[in-house]
């Protein structure tokens, strides 16, 4: 997560690495959703050893950047590997060990320019789908077609209340698009409320409703896309 803060800082300030101060640290402790104390449109999500940082504008609607990847804690450091970066593909595949400090609610970052940045952990309610999911199949002409694991992939990062999909290539560093916001999942109905969309800002504010069911550990997801096209997707949890 430090890396993630680091990345957030990198994008926000166009400067190098930042240092994080943290009190107690484990991947489980850090897991959750955070908002930048000075800008609620900067969101950090940490879930199951994976993180994403996204910056966007609500009014007017505008996507700014996103980045993320794997993380793990080791002592008082957070080790991070970058999987995607919408603004700087050269960072994909890079590893960083970031010192950090966390009090269970506030994550404080001391930047090289002397500015102190705070991330505030948000309260959430469980929706039952939290995890990192990879699209592993689609129904085409009434037949399920498998999508093998490969460098070019689409992931969904789901916390208890927030979702984000990311299309990327982890080998080339290419970034193809992202979208996200808040979601609910109840009685087999999965509903997305879009807050940012990198390809088309006009889709912000849309409410998309789908049928959703977890079968044998795989999430079956059907309905209509933001373009109105029918979809039937299968998502598998990333271990």
Image: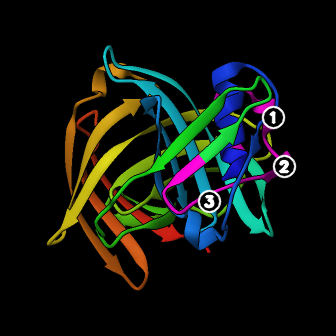
Seen in the picture, residue 71 relative to 106 is either above or below; the reply is: below
User: Quick check: is 228 in the magenta stretch?
Assistant: no
Q: Position of residue 16 (x, y in %)?
A: 82, 28
Of labels 2 and 1, earlier in sequence is 1
Report the number of discs: 3
Residue positioned 67% across, 31% down in the render: 9
Q: Does the CB distance between marks 2 and 1 fall below 8 Å?
A: yes
Residue indicated by mark 1: 17
What is the secondary structure assignment of the residue under circle 2? strand
- Give the labeled residue for mark 3: 50
Query: Which of pointers 2 and 3 indicates the residue nearer the eye?
Result: 2
| Element carrying mark 1 | loop
The image quadrant where one finds the C terminus is bottom right
Gap between marks 3 and 1 measured at Cα: 19 Å
Above or below, 73 against 97 in this view is: below
Disc 2 and disc 1: Cα gap in Å? 9 Å
Question: Distance of mark 2 from mark 3, alpha carbons?
Answer: 14 Å
* Residues rendered magenta in the picture: 83-107
Residue situated furthest top in the rendering = 60
Query: Residue 161 at what x, y percent from top left?
Result: 32, 57
The residue singled out by tag 2 in the image is 96
């Amino acid at each position: 997560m430090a890396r993630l803060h680091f990345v957030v800082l990198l994008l926000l300030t166009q400067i190098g690495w930042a240092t994080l101060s943290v009190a107690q640290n484990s991947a489980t402790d850090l897991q959750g959703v955070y908002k930048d104390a000075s800008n609620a449109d900067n969101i950090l999500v940490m879930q199951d050893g994976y993180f994403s940082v996204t910056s966007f504008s609500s009014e007017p609607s505008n996507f700014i950047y996103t980045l993320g990847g794997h993380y793990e804690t080791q002592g008082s450091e957070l080790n991070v590997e970058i999987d995607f970066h919408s603004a700087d593909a050269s960072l994909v595949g890079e590893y960083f060990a970031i010192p950090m400090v966390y009090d269970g609610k506030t994550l404080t970052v001391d930047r090289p320019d002397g500015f102190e940045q705070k991330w505030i952990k948000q309260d959430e309610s469980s929706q039952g789908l939290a995890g990192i999911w990879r699209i592993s199949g689609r129904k085409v002409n009434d037949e399920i077609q498998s999508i093998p694991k490969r460098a070019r992939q689409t992931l969904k990062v789901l916390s208890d209340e927030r979702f984000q999909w990311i299309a990327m290539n982890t080998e080339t560093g290419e970034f193809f698009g992202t979208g996200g916001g808040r979601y609910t999942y109840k009685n087999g109905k999965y509903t997305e409320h879009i807050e940012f969309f990198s390809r088309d800002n006009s889709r912000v504010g849309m409410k998309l409703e789908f049928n959703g069911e977890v079968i044998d550990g795989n999430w079956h997801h059907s309905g209509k896309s933001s373009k109105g096209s029918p979809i039937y997707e299968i998502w598998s949890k990333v271990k």
